[in-house]
Amino acid sequence: MTEREDEIGADAEPGTETEFDPEKFEEKYVYYFEELETAYSNAYQQLHGRVDSEVLRAIDRQVLSESEPLYEGDGEFSVELPDDPKGRVGAVGAGDEQFEAVLSEFTERIEGELRRLFGFDSAE
């Protein structure tokens, strides 16, 4: 995935939900690619302008582009990260604490967007 701010608008209509089938999520890139892109894009947009843009962009391009969204059951999602996320981004002018904070908030927002898009969570 590339930088999400240029791909899909973050203004998905509130209340627009996709019917979710856990079995289809096993082949998520076939059945739910658009929803996945929207979730990542919306999460990016929520953080854009609030956190260091260099750190956000590096995480988006170098870490989350290789991440794997997973359905855990009971309406819960997680984002499996590739090995050594900090090492993947190199020097981005952020200390470990700042990097971890942005990465954590970004993945939490992606998980929240997936819950919302699939109708598991009506609150943002």
Image (cartoon, rainbow, N blue to C red):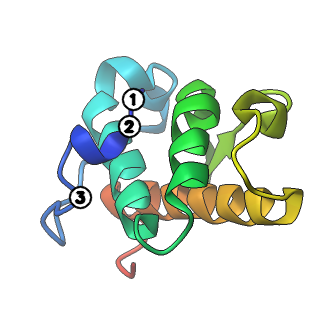
The residue under label 3 is which amino acid type?
A: Ala
Residue assigned mark 1: 2
Residue assigned mark 2: 3
> Could you say which is closer to the camera, residue 11 or residue 102?
102
Q: Residue 74 location in percent, x, y?
A: 59, 58
- SS at circle 2: loop
Q: Tell me: residue 121, above or below residue 4.
A: below
Q: Residue 122 location in percent, x, y?
A: 35, 77
Residue assigned mark 3: 10
The residue under label 1 is which amino acid type?
A: Thr
Q: Nearer the viewer, mark 2 or mark 3?
A: 2
> Could you say which is closer to the camera, residue 108 or residue 78?
108
Q: Quadrant of the N terminus?
A: top left
What is the spatial separation of the Cα atoms under label 2 and label 3, in whole angstroms?
A: 12 Å
Q: Nearer the viewer, mark 3 or mark 1?
A: 1
- SS at circle 3: loop
Residue 122 in the figure: left or right of residue 62:
left
Q: Tell me: residue 114, above or below residue 92.
A: below
The residue under label 2 is which amino acid type?
A: Glu
Q: Tell me: residue 53, above or below residue 2.
A: below
Say if residue 74 shows up in the picture: no
Q: Residues within 10 Å of mark 3 (few under 14, many from 20)?
A: some
Seen at 23% across and 58% down, the residue is: 10
What is the spatial separation of the Cα atoms under label 2 and label 1, in whole angstroms?
A: 4 Å
What is the spatial separation of the Cα atoms under label 3 and label 1, in whole angstroms?
A: 15 Å
Contact (CB < 8 A) between labels 2 and 1?
Answer: yes
Say if residue 67 shows up in the picture: yes
Seen at 34% across and 58% down, the residue is: 42
